[in-house]
């Protein structure tokens, strides 16, 4: 069954951890590269500190603590390692393709990732045609999540009213950004990085609801529509 949602102008999807199950890979690779650069950190610490934030913001924080810049080739080495791992093992979140096929209102992606990383992830998992060219990156705005800039930018480009946008997010910065933009956030907790209590954490941050199976999203949207938002 295909679903048309009357009260909504737009559904905005985060990419990492929502469309593609990438966060376990990303946190591990990021931790390895930071440790090699002289900043010892675990994948779990990367997850708790930097999930949902742009790499630029994370690296600025690391550099402030180190009192020096990361190596000039750090970004290139991190990107190469990530792309190698993605090519080998990245998968789409289960059932996301069928869920996207059931939604007829406009959709877009708004991610903290760099444009080439987002494109590589969506291409690898076969999801890019469902969204292109409506794929937006924190690199296009002055401030990344938890600031509202990226979501407001996406809504403007899509001709949508912020109050009529539904955001699907897996991180506290993402939920915070959606709320700051005047949008409704729904917390997705089905990625491999999400442990017990992740839904409660997102709800505490302001998500309207939490869910862990993409097949549940259509019913959540239906209830949102029935209630008028």
Image (cartoon, rainbow, N blue to C red):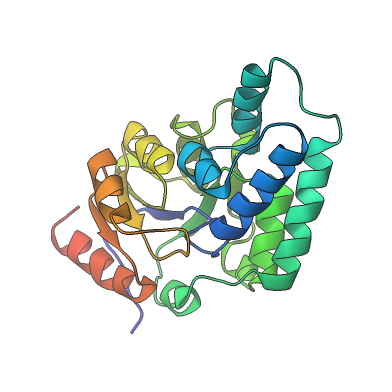
Q: Position of residue 223 (x, y in %)?
A: 18, 65
Residue most toward the left?
227
Q: Is 20 situated above or below 80?
A: below
Q: How many marks?
A: 0
Please identify the quarter of the rendering in which residue 82 is found: bottom right
Residue most toward the bottom?
1
Q: Position of residue 75 (x, y in %)?
A: 78, 39
Residue found 45% across the figure and 63% down from its top: 191
Q: Nearer the viewer, residue 53 or 108?
A: 53
Does 62 sit left or right of 50 as displayed? Answer: right
Residue found 37% across the figure and 34% down from its top: 181
Does 188 sit left or right of 46 as displayed? Answer: left
Residue found 64% across the figure and 56% down from its top: 133
Q: Position of residue 165 (x, y in %)?
A: 35, 48
Q: Is 193 situated above or below 1?
A: above
Residue found 34% across the figure and 31% down from its top: 180
Q: Nearer the viewer, residue 133 or 141?
A: 141
Confirm whether residue 157 shows in the render: no
Please identify the quarter of the rendering in which residue 174 is found: top left
Q: Position of residue 90 (x, y in %)?
A: 64, 68
Q: Where is the N terminus found, in terms of image quarters?
A: bottom left
Confirm whether residue 183 shows in the render: yes
Residue most toward the top?
67
Q: Is 112 situated above or below 101?
A: above
């Amino acid at each position: 069954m295909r679903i048309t949602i009357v009260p909504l102008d737009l559904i905005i999807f985060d990419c990492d951890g929502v469309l593609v199950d990438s966060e376990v890979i990303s946190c591990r690779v990021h931790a390895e590269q930071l440790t090699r650069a002289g900043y010892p950190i675990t994948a779990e610490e990367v997850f708790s500190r930097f999930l949902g934030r742009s790499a630029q913001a994370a690296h600025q924080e690391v550099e402030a603590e180190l009192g020096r810049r990361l190596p000039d080739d750090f970004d290139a080495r991190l990107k190469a390692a990530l792309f190698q791992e993605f090519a080998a093992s990245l998968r789409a979140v289960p059932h996301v393709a069928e869920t996207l096929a059931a939604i007829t209102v406009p959709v877009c992606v708004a991610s903290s990732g760099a444009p080439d990383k987002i494109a590589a992830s969506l291409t690898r998992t076969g999801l890019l045609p469902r969204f292109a060219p409506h794929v937006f990156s924190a690199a296009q705005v002055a401030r990344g999540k938890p600031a509202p800039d990226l979501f407001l930018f996406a809504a403007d480009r899509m001709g949508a009213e912020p109050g009529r946008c539904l955001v699907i997010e897996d991180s506290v910065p993402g939920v915070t950004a959606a709320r700051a933009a005047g949008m409704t956030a729904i917390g997705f907790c089905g990625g491999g990085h999400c442990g017990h209590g992740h839904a409660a954490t997102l709800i505490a941050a302001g998500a309207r609801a939490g869910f862990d199976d993409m097949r549940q999203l259509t019913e959540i949207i239906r209830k949102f529509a029935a209630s008028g938002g």
